[in-house]
Image: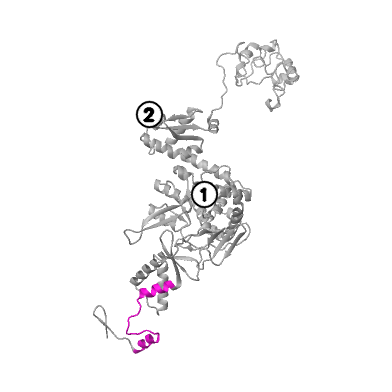
Amino acid sequence: MTLRANGTTSPAPTALARSIVEANGIDPDKKGPSQASQLAALARERYELFMSDDGRPYGVTIGGPNLALPLRGKAGLRSQLARQFADSNNGTVPSQSALADAMTVLEGIAAVADPRTPQLRVARHHERIIIDLGTSDGRCVAVDTDGWQRLPASPVVFRRSGAMKPLPEPVSDGDGLAKLRTLLNTTDDGFELLAAWLVASFIPDLPHPILAFRGEQGTGKSKGAAMVIGIIDPSGAPKRTAPRDLKSWAVQAFNSWAICLDNVSTVPDWLSDALCRAVTGDGIVDRALYTDDDVVVLEFRRVLAMTTIDAGALAGDLAERLLTIELQLIPDHRRREEAELDRAYADAHPAILASLFDLLAKVLKALPDIELSERPRMADFARVLAAVDHVTGWHTLDSYKSATADAVADVLDGEPFAQAVVDLVDKAGAEGITVTASQLLEQVATPDKLPKKWPKDPTRAGGQLKRLAPALRTIGIEVDDSQRGPKPKKQRLYKLTPSPERRCETASPASPTVPETPVTSANRGDASATPSASPLPPRGDAEAAEGDAALFVASPHGSTADLHEYEQGDAGTAGDAEMQPLSAPAPVCTACGYPLDSVLAAYGETTHPGCDAPPTTNPITKGV
């Protein structure tokens, strides 16, 4: 009998068990290595351990796929070691305490190794872009300026998450983009812009604008977004609701390369800021699990999409990072069942990837020679669009600039204070206005019931104007806050000036003026007045015709003598073909100059019956 630690006894090992242990070179009377020691030795033999730049320990299988397994958590190296230990010890399962002790030792080993950062789905390796297919054997696709190829193993360390699904292997099978075009109901310009965005989504080291599918109900926004995100980064949850807080958002963004937020109507300020940071690159610090004084950092730059009916409620800085694709309403007779769409999408996915990788290779080759004369907010992405246009002959860069300007204009439409500022600047004229924040609040048209975002004091007004400045510049209003007022207060001055283009757009065209007084010998023949048409005067009533001259359309037709003078070389008036009406001029009386009745003209008459008025009495021809 053997005494246990708790005071109970266990039967002594049988002779057979004793002989088996002795045959393996182990003294049964001595205590062997602990389970934790065996687990640590097993891990060091089979895995290369390292720490990432954000302080997370990983292990990569030696001689296996180049996939990083996290030491922390139950879905990584811990569970693999438990399985391997059981296989090596006739099914004996290691205890949880042994696994925890072994993980502590392995983290210490990883901490002294050279740090490496495992990538998620897409990475750059020298001059090539590597796309992880998400398979268990670690296969990938490499794209460079010469084309693309499938590789059995990745030269880059990738990590996986539970949200990821495998990508199909690309297959060159016809025009994959044409197949994708049949699955989406946007315009041709919108589809070309979408295709360029998809190409850019496989370039990891640049900010990607947020793809926004916009349209009314029944336009297929959610299904279209799910297909587009699935092309880049398939997931069990391609569409997700807006996160409830920053931590849940960080977890989602850290574990997926591409994310789509579905049915976005309003975006809280914290999420708007988080989305903007995720476009350009973000890092969130959180307390490490089971610790009080240690932290972990979640770093990510992501490809984002959203579906919305109205993007006007979005913040200005978020709107500037949007790429909006308008979807058209699907008629009932053209609507397709979801199962049919899924089958068509699954069949086309390999060819879509192949066509996108073909286009990506051409874009990578053209990019070094692309230079932009003007760089918009998302300059790196704009340069990719210019390369796409160079390769394909499309006009995606112009479409993107136009869509961005429309999105910013929509945001300003949803900001009552911004609209009040725009109206104030437009009324001020070419010089604009130069005011303090308090003067701005006094001068703008204040609604009877203040909206929620209306600034309550000059400090908030100045801050809101600062936030709106990029959007105002987009619509042609320059904002300069570098000046200071006179001493002693030296208040900040805000100079708002409309651009020449905006002044031309907002200037009201000169409307025709009609004289209110009867036409006399002193004012008739004034070419600046543009009379409107009226019925013809009675035939022979020269005085009535003369008094009603202001009601006729200004169409100068001179007398016979006048016409001879034009023919003799006045090319700037009668001879100017660009100034003549497209239709033949109406026949006029050679005596008074007023239009002839069509019946008289048809019989060859050239004057009104009984008309003896001299041509100079005609207010239209006088002074010509």
Dominant SS of magenta comes to helix
Local packing at callout 1 (Cα closer than 10 Å; few below 14, some 14-19, many 20+) is: many
Left or right of 136 on screen, residue 188 = right
Does 177 sit above or below residue 569? below
- The type of colouring in the image is one colour
- In this figure, which residue is indicated by the disc labeled 2? 487
- Of tags 2 and 1, which is closer to the observer? 2
At label 2, the amino acid type is Lys
Quarter of the figure that contains the C terminus: top right
Q: Earlier in the sequence, mark 2 or mark 1?
A: 1
Q: CA distance from mark 2 to mark 1?
A: 59 Å
- Please state the horizontal and vertical placement of residue 4, each as a whole percent of the image: 26, 80
**Residue 326: in sight, yes or no?**
no
Residue at 36% x, 75% y: name it: 35
Residue at 32% x, 83% y: name it: 30
Quarter of the figure that contains the N terminus: bottom left
The secondary structure type at the circle numbered 2 is: loop
Highlighted magenta segment, given as a residue range: 15-44
Residue 22 falls within the magenta-colored stretch: yes
- In this figure, which residue is indicated by the disc labeled 1? 219
Does 321 sit above or below residue 31? above
Local packing at callout 2 (Cα closer than 10 Å; few below 14, some 14-19, many 20+) is: few
- Please state the horizontal and vertical placement of residue 232, each as a whole percent of the image: 52, 57
Which residue reaches farthest left?
A: 7
Residue 45 falls within the magenta-colored stretch: no
At label 1, the amino acid type is Thr
